[in-house]
Amino acid sequence: MKKSETRIKRTPPQSEDHGQIVVAIGASAGGLEAIQEFFRAMPTDSGLAFVVIQHLSPDYRSLMDELLARYTRMRILKAEENMPVEANTVYLIPPRKNLRIFHDRLLLEDQNLRKGLNLPIDIFFRSLAAEKGKLAIGIILSGTGSDGALGTRAIKEAGGMIMVQDDATAKFDGMPHSSISTGLVDYVLPPSQMPDELLNYLKHPFVGKEQALEVALTENLDALTKIMLIVREHSGIDFSYYKENTILRRLERRVSINRFTTLEQYVQFLSESEKEQSILYRELLIGVTRFFRDNEAFELLVEKVFPNIFRPDKRVVRIWSAGCSTGEEAYSLAMLCREYIDAHHFEGEVKIFATDIDRHSLEVAGQGFYLDSMVADIGPTRLSRFFTRRESGYQNNESIRKMVIFATHNLLRDPPFSKQDLIVCRNLFIYLKPEMQNRILSVFYHALNPEAYFLMGSSENIGELQDGFQVIDSKWKLYRQRPGYSPPLSKSLPLFRTTRTSVDAPLPMTGSLNDASRLLEQMLGVFAPPSVLIDENNNIVHVINDVNRFIQLRPGRFSQQLFNLLPSELGLIVNSLLRRLRETRTEVIYEDVAGLSDQPNLRVDLEGRTIEDGRRRYVLLTFRTIARDGDPPATPRLSIAADGQIQERLTEVERELQFTKENLQAAIEELETSNEELQSSNEELIASNEELQSTNEELQSVNEELYTVNAEYQAKIEEMIRLNNDINNLLNNTEVAALYLDRHLCIRKFTPSLMRITNLRDADIGRPLYHLSVSNAYAGLLDDINQVIRNLQPVEKEITTASGAPYLMRIVPYRTEDNAVDGVLATFVDISRLKHESTRANQAIQRLQLAMEMGQMAWWDWDVTTGEVVADSKKATMLGYQVHEFPTNVYQICALIHPDDYDKAMQAMRDHLNGATPTYEITYRIRTKTGGYRWYADRGGVVARDAQGKPLRVTGIVIDVTPQKLLEVGLHHEHEVMLKLLENSALAALLVDADGRIVFTNRRAQAMLGASGRQLSDLTFSATDWVIEDTGGHLLPAEHYPFATIMRTMQPFTDRRFLFHLPGGDVVPIAMHGSPTLGVEGKLAGAVFVMEEVKDE
């Protein structure tokens, strides 16, 4: 290691003054499997406490403790009031409760559903962030909605760590996606990989040990400066104004998460990774906010501030929300303003300037769309009034959105908004150094109207400017400006750069502003006239003294352009001055220039000077106020009277007008050309319209013809009604062997197939049936027909014709369309095939019963609504019961299931009934009549559901698999014995699978090959991972490697000699025996190798 490197020693997880480390796990729909995967991979002795927060139904008992106990040996407790959190314990939230933590004790509170959406994960995450600080750890697993997103912000603000389930592995990605979209997540992983990353993170000294990074920095003072420079080059923002603790807390986490052991390694990584630069930039810009944060502070504004700023004579109320982040604070102010305006009938306008340094946050704020969890702090009344429900969130309404103007703004560099009635800047100063706080407070002082208001965060203070502000409320830090006060830095506004051609080194992380610079700032404020320094693009880059009489902020997006800020009276004059100055490169003075229209007695001398710093050329524009009757000013080097200025400007305007006229003439000519083309198109459209009219007339004629045809068809319809009745009756009986009789039993018609079973012919139509002989079809046919006529009830029976063919005869009254009886319809259905299939079905049932009996199987059918179970008698006899002894109620049957298998079986059935699984499949033990247990493989599925999808019937089969289970246990025992024999063998043993991957090595093999079992399991027994030579020292071809030989020949080999090159560089002579292992169908499943080191003779 180089001498300059700062090595970080790894230590076990520890929390020092933070108490027990607590890991909060939030999950909802689909989270059960994710929680089980997580705890299956988490060691039981990690030393951590886990709190699982879920969305639980208030009406059902949670089974999470029982289900989770199968995946971890840690204690699992349901949280109770004032319960202490202890290591290696899992705590579960109870139903209908929210959970908080205070001094390592869990506190319960009832859910208040009257407030609207309840977000238990956000509630506990916030509490954990306040309790544990940088050791707060939150994990978000599968779930719908956005619960956890606000908690993610809170934990990140406290310096903690967030893990989120990869949404590709989540059954429901709503909650993971919402947290990931905050841009604050440290790890996105499948649940099974989270424990390893979590434990590695906690082992890093920067996480568990206080001031570890500060100690490392004392050994390398340049590292932090380099980091700040890299971030500034990436973002254009100098974070050296931030407090050291704020920066170091963010750096600790990034170094820990990336697993670096020296600061130099992280600096090198940061300089090469734009992604890490963006992440660190976002980490440093974390702005945690929410709607109506500290609601009492907002109520204080309505009570103490609004009556004084919403005065009847006030035309525009200006409010500045500085450091607005994603806009929640600004929109909260807008809602309060709208409510106050409507209640007090204020007729003026409200403008809320919402600024932040982070463009991404402003983009979110400008959209005005917030997830469900983000609006949880807004009451139902306000939510319905000011927001509209959208998919997965809420969109704010125009009534508040139009009040707010968002703009990117750096408080340390950019000119402020002026004439503000209220400035709200909360929880920003806690991140800044004192000298930067004073500088911004000075800016705010001048930006406020006299006796206007300023609201800070509750943990912040006014510092050195306490004489400039009157305390209105000390708890919520509400102040009122005192006119006439001169802040130490009030005369110099921050530097603003519109472009960045190079990046200077950031300010030192320690120390204060240079005393000489401070004195120079104060002297300029006292002696220098109001001036602005502008660059070549006329952007203001510096302001000296009070220029508020000449510079005016306008509504809309903020601009630093000089001409966007000057009054119109000065704009033309200043434009002429700048043009002359840049042409002559000498000082230019315009004397006795009118100032503002609302100040007619104000006169100013305008001075312009060119200033160069070697790289850029600036202009210093000075405003010197003079009285109308004052002494004449000294003769300038170049002076232009006001009349000359106007004449010069008129000349310029005339040139511009001439140019405009020429452009207008060209535009007119283009329009004339376009007009001709449009006229041509119009003529074509007129011709097309005439063609359409002609076509319409033709269609009208066709329509009249169709009407006539329709009338003819209407007459035909009546003729077809009777035929339709016949067809309908025929179709209702599904067969075509039909006999139609009228009310007098005369034959109206019959189908041709009827002639195959009777001696009727076409000539018989119209004749009475009783005059004909149809006894060859069925001797009692006439009697049955007469019975139907008398009773008007159908007759159906199975008959056999003279030829011995079976038929199903059905005789029904023949009904017309108006339901009148107009004869009889007799149908004969050939059921020869049905009889044959019935015989086959009976045989199949017999075979199935025999197979089920031989295979120890039985069927069952469960009526879900009644709980009754109908089952094969075999199900009772397999357990030693008589049929009448075996229970028929599903709950009584389930009570026979082994206690260790009961919950698993019930959960499998619930999952299937709820549609989570396509079939119900479970293997469990069930008690016999004698008290013993047998293994059942139970398979089934829902076969009927109601209209709402609720299951009605479930059917399936059970198979007695006790012999197979006993065989499985025996095989497992033999396998364990075999592995123990191999493990303790004096010979080196190595097993590979069909792909050549090493799946087992005994201790002797590990010692011989110079690697651990875990290292060897990552290798294949091939030329890819090993270098093997023959005894002559020649490198073996890949196809002659031991496993390749086995694959090629499918034959064993004995006593082959090789020279193995080990990872450490040693070469070991080895004698090897190899044999293939075969799987099903005789295919190669792998190979076993026995090796022995050949000692030199």
Image (spheres, helix red, strand yellow):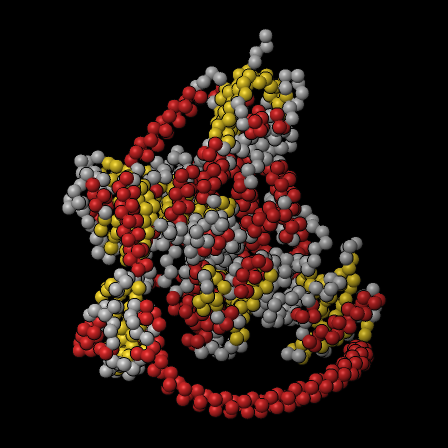
Q: Residue at x 46, y 64 (%)?
A: 391
Q: Quadrant of residue 299?
A: bottom left
In percent of width and height, residue 220 lies at 62, 36
Query: Looking at this view, is 691 or 393 the one in front?
Result: 691
Q: Residue at x 50, y 88 (%)?
A: 706
Query: Looking at this view, is 372 or 720 the one in front?
Result: 720
Q: Residue at x 31, y 80 (%)?
A: 765
In the picture shown, does residue 93 fall above or below 495?
above
In the picture shown, does residue 431 fall above or below 343?
above
Q: Is residue 431 in view?
A: yes
In this picture, residue 662 sits left or right of residue 438? right
Identify the image quadrant of the C terminus: top right
In percent of width and height, residue 296 lies at 40, 61
In percent of width and height, residue 468 lies at 53, 61
Query: Looking at this view, is 895 or 633 the one in front?
Result: 895
In percent of width and height, residue 891 lies at 22, 48
Q: Is residue 1005 in view?
A: no
Query: Looking at this view, is 908 or 308 the one in front?
Result: 908
Q: Residue at x 61, y 71 (%)?
A: 554
In the picture shown, does residue 243 fall above or below 865?
above
Q: Quadrant of residue 22?
A: top left
